[in-house]
Image: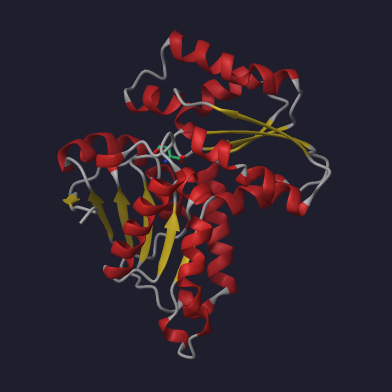
Amino acid sequence: MIGVFDSGFGGLTILKSFLEHLPQYDYLYLGDNARTPYGNRSPELIYQFTREAVDFLFGQGCQLILIACFTASAEALQQIQQEYLPEKNQRDKKLQRRILGVIRPLVEEAIRFNNFKKIGVIGTCGTINSQTFIRELKKINPNLEIHQKECPLLVPLIEEGYYLRREAKMILRNYLRQLKLKKIDTLILGCTHYPIMLKQIRQVIGKSCRILNPGEIVAKSLVEYLTRHPEIESQLSRNSQVRFFTTDNPEKFKIFGSKFLGQKIDKVEKMNLSN
Ligand code: DGL
């Protein structure tokens, strides 16, 4: 089973692409809706919340966990991966479990073609302040010109269904102004929610800028990962079943979650992370 974790609904945009590209596997989605948004929280809390989610998903029998939240991937993934690292040394390869994030696939896609040199990154305050994208991009190509911008109002605008309004476009224009002036050739959507505003982002940033949309990219990267790691792939169950868990109201999750996933969600289970 593949566990997919996000602070709330946003990771469903990633799960949607998994269901298109890898429909054969079983998935367990967990949204920490009771404590969302993570974007403005301290790194310590983001780590604690993410660790609790990872423990829950492993406890449910997931062999592979995808942290589908950019803020959690930026602020907590590396530490949590290291804490589970001893498992890598286990002799019994059949018992191996893995935790992946969403930043690496976007970074690899950004540097795939070397004619793109001016990269823009947008995300939550947590993701941008962590400098994780800059660090990872520069590790691979120190000559890249990278410009970041935190866009804290976009998540609430999307969650409240305000993103189609004129006011939302004005805010977006404001956020993207500097990146546009810098003439970036690539824009990384470094937040699970932003694909919902893809059309508006494209209109504002202009057609000549390549936009990296996480869902497709992360799904293709997972396909490649599973091909490279048969020891993990062979452990995954294949009944095409998806279970949804939330830490908040399951009825609300059904309604909002269905919009993010692009299909109806019939059953959602409630659970508590903080014990
Ligand atoms: N899931 C978060 C991310 O991708 C956005 C929502 C939040 O701030 O929790 O960064």
Q: Quadrant of ligand 1?
A: top left
* Figure check: 143 above or below 5: above
Residue 244's place in the image compared with 80, above or below, is above
In the rendered view, does 64 fall on the left or right side of 228? Answer: left
Residue drawn at 36 percent across, 44 percent down: 7
Q: Pick whichever, 63 or 126, lies toward us.
A: 126
- Can residue 112 be seen at all in this image of the molecule? no
Task: List x then y, in percent, for residue 20.
Answer: 44, 52
Nearest the viewer among 173 and 241 is: 173
Q: Residue drawn 54% across and 52% down?
A: 218
Quadrant in the picture for residue 53? bottom left
Q: Which of 263 and 59 is in front in this view?
A: 59
Q: Can residue 168 be seen in this view?
A: yes
Q: Position of residue 77 (x, y in %)?
A: 49, 56
Q: Which residue lies at the image location 62% right of the left edge and 42% below the top edge?
A: 131
173, above or below 95, in the image:
above
Percent from the top left, x then y, of residue 200? 53, 21
Q: Which of 43 and 253 is in front in this view?
A: 43
